[in-house]
Amino acid sequence: MSDLPDLAVDISGLTKTYGGQNGRPAKLALDGVTLSIPRGSFFGLLGPNGAGKSTLINILAGLVNKSSGAAKVWGHDIDASVRLARLSIGVVPQELNLDPFFTPFEMLEVQAGLYGVPKANRRTLEILAAMGLADKAHSYARTLSGGMRRRLLVAKALVHSPPVLVLDEPTAGVDIELRRNLWDYVRQLNAAGTTILLTTHYLEEAEELCDRIAIIDQGHLIACEEKPALMQRLDTKGLTLTLAQPITAIPEMLACFAPEIKEGGKLFIRYRPSATGVGRILEAVRESGLVLADLTTHEADLEDVFLALTKAARAEHHQP
């Protein structure tokens, strides 16, 4: 029987309130968040700026004290088993907080020492090579480009081989090629069993990479589902109709679908698949005497779902 936990991260009722300063009121950053991240998953944590993502991550990493609730990392309570919990997680922060007078090799060696990794077990050169930094191993960090510094942060988070890797906006300021290389390596880590927790404002990245996604806004968890289920939350599709003869007015038979006339006289119809089949729309097109030259369907993407859910959540909490 495996001793590995079923949940890589297990959060229950997590709350954090930052005390007010200089006459400002206290700020509730997390409001009773309950969240489970299965072992081995590629998990996306999404939310607008100020939603509480970084606070949650910093609590897991032991950098911020929670106000109430409980959290476990790899089965270790962050309060009762501080050392084991911290050994189980590696965090790649948003900020490029690197000592400019250290080389990448020195930086990883120091980091490994802080985590108590014996010299015989260190993988410094292996990790630098995986990050494409082998030729910069003995160059000062201040000479590295922004993209290289970002990859060096990933390398630092890997020195103690944590089973949970947190990537907090890891591709901010990284060019497309380096971003692809980074994701290829992170996918390999995930395939080998590392649980990945990703926060990103590039929603297309989360949609492509993650198998499970949570959305947090204003300290509230508003969704946490496997990606296919989340994508189906928004019951909407789009249909672009290219006609043999462009039109300038909406035929009466199509008015009930509230179509829009787009550039080139094309028709765009947004509809709910649960209520309206595409066949019904096409039948109305034929009955209108229009000749169809081509059609394109548009599925709702993660950005559509994200915007719809955060808008609904804010309306429920009556906040702007």
Image: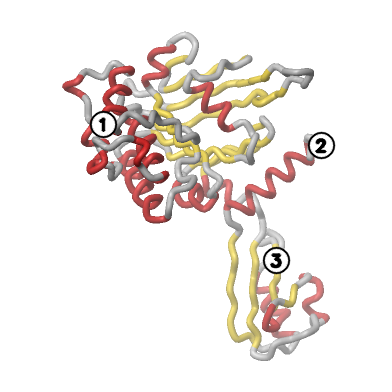
The image quarter containing residue 52 is top right
CA–CA distance in space, label 2 to label 1: 51 Å
Lower position in the chain sequence, tag 2 or tag 1: 1
Disc 2 target residue: 318
- Can see residue 1? no
Give the amino acid at mark 3.
Arg
Give the amino acid at mark 2.
His
Q: Position of residue 302 (x, y in %)?
A: 58, 52
CA–CA distance in space, label 2 to label 3: 28 Å
Q: Does 310 appear above or below 280? A: above
Q: Position of residue 10 (x, y in %)?
A: 50, 24
Q: Secondary structure at mark 1?
A: helix
Disc 1 target residue: 105
Disc 3 to disc 1: CB gap under 8 Å? no
Q: What crowding class fits label 1: few (fewer than 14 Cα within 10 Å), some (14-19), or many (20 or more)?
A: many
Q: What crowding class fits label 2: few (fewer than 14 Cα within 10 Å), some (14-19), or many (20 or more)?
A: few
Front position among marks 2 and 3: 2
Front-lying residue, 252 or 178? 178
Disc 3 target residue: 270
Lower position in the chain sequence, tag 2 or tag 3: 3
